[in-house]
Image (cartoon, grey):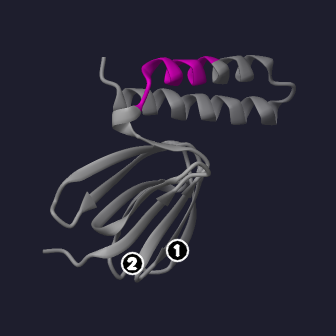
Amino acid sequence: MAEAFKFELVSPERLLVSEEVQSVVIPGAEGEMTVLAQHAPVMTTIKPGVVTVKSVNGQEERYVVFGGFADILPSGCTLLAESATSVKDIDRAELARRIQEAREDAADAKDDEAKTRAEAFLAQLTTLEGAILPA
């Protein structure tokens, strides 16, 4: 059995997870990464995506995060998300609304930098929609 470590997922609204876990897969800005006990210290920004938490009993829970950062130490991992919710609680209409807003932001962008940021966020949202809400 894999060694357990402390994981906390925190959003501005609430503490979503605070428990001993086997592993956590997070959508880091540089790519998806799996965190295990005794992980080398790392701090990374988080892009919108799905966090998969594997508990010590082997059950998996998935959470959607929209930005933030993760502080990873050998003894644990804390993910501070700008916004987070359980995949079970995702509202298809809310996700569609966010995608539409991102499309509008991309169309209304005043300069190339703003347009690039808006298009990247839109791409992340549509990828996220495909990953968590099968047709």
- 117 or 61, nearer to the observer: 61
What numbered label is drawn on residue 63?
none
Q: How many numbered tags mark residues here?
A: 2
72 in relation to 107, above or below: below
86 relative to 94 in the view: left or right: left
- Per the image, is 20 magenta? no
Amino acid tagged 1: Val
Vertical side of 52 occupied by 57: above or below: below
Give, as a single range, the part of the protein colored magenta: 90-100
Q: Image point 32% across, 77% down: which residue? A: 37
Relative to 128, 116 lies left or right? right
| Cβ atoms at labels 2 and 1 below 8 Å apart | yes
At 39% from the left and 33% from the top, the residue drawn is 89
- Residue 95 located within the stretch drawn in magenta: yes
Q: Main secondary structure of the magenta part?
A: helix
Amino acid type, residue under disc 2 in the picture? His
Q: Residue at x 42, y 56 (%)?
A: 26
Does 123 sit above or below residue 55?
above
The 10 Å Cα crowd at callout 1, few under 14, some 14 to 19, many 20 or more, is few
- Where is residue 40 shown, x and y percent of the image? 44, 80
Judging by the rendered image, the residue that carries numbered circle 2 is: 39
Q: What kind of element bears circle 2?
A: loop
The CA distance from mark 2 to mark 1 is 8 Å
Which residue matches tag 1? Answer: 42
- State which quarter of the image contains the C terminus: top left
Residue at far front of view: 14
Instruction: Specify the quadrant that holds the N terminus.
Output: bottom left
Residue lying at 38% horizontally and 27% vertically, measured from the top left = 130
Judge the density around disc 2: few (<14), some (14-19), many (≥20) Cα neighbours within 10 Å: some
